[in-house]
Amino acid sequence: MSPFASLPSRAASMLLVFSPCTEGKCCVAKVTLVFAFLLVALGLVGYLGTGSQHSTALIPTWIGLALGVGGYLAISPKESRRKLFMHANVTIALLGFLGTGVELVRSYVHASAVGMPPNQIALASKITLASLLLIYIILCVRSFIAARRSGKV
């Protein structure tokens, strides 16, 4: 029986976010919330660092919010729900990584062709976004492989 069984369901689910992982369940969902926070922070720092002029600097924030919602919904005792939202999250991260990689190369090539140095803040933000998403994807894939090998899936 869960120690949160006597609490209303919403309060219990909020406490579940901060409870330690049990039997490996929900751990990657909690890692997702950490990455979501980092992406939201990256987007806000990039947006405010450009003087709030470039709304595209908020792209990491939107990706982080999507991952955060999916991560919150993945914290569930139901295995099918957890698998659904974690696979949706890794798909969002993969699309974000691919899009960021293409845009990183495109903006660098364009700046070189014009003869101007690339915008350093934008370049750093894109590299950080791509790196965070790649790390998250690797962690998710490793978790999926481990779950498959354990035979519990």
Image (tube, grey):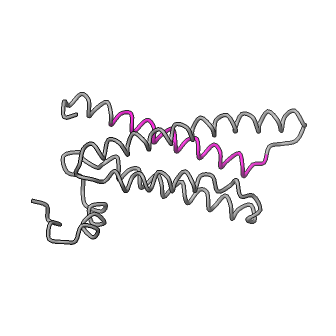
At 17% from the left edge and 66% from the top edge, which residue is drawn? 4
Q: How many marks?
A: 0
**Percent x, y for residue 28?**
34, 46
- Going 31% across and 60% down the picture, which residue do you hit? 17
Q: Is residue 121 magenta?
A: yes
Q: Is residue 94 left or right of residue 27?
A: right
Decide: is 80 above or below 51: above
User: 104 or 10: nearer the eye?
Assistant: 10
Left or right: 119 in relation to 6: right
Residue sticking out furthest to the top:
149
Seen in the picture, residue 138 relative to 81 is either above or below; the reply is: above
| Residue plotted at (69% across, 38% down) | 104
Figure quadrant of residue 127: top right
- Dominant SS of magenta comes to helix
**Position of residue 24 measured from the top left corner of the image (x, y, whole percent):** 23, 45
Determine which quarter of the picture holds residue 146: top left
Q: Quarter of the image for the N terminus: give it.
A: bottom left
Q: Is residue 81 left or right of residue 41?
A: left
Q: Kindly identify the residue that appears in the image at 48 percent across and 54 percent down.
A: 36
Q: Position of residue 21 (x, y in %)?
A: 24, 52
> Percent position (x, y) of residue 42?
59, 56
Q: Residue pushed farthest left? A: 1
**Quadrant holding the C terminus:** top left
Q: Which residues are magenta?
A: 119-143
Q: Quadrant of residue 13?
A: bottom left
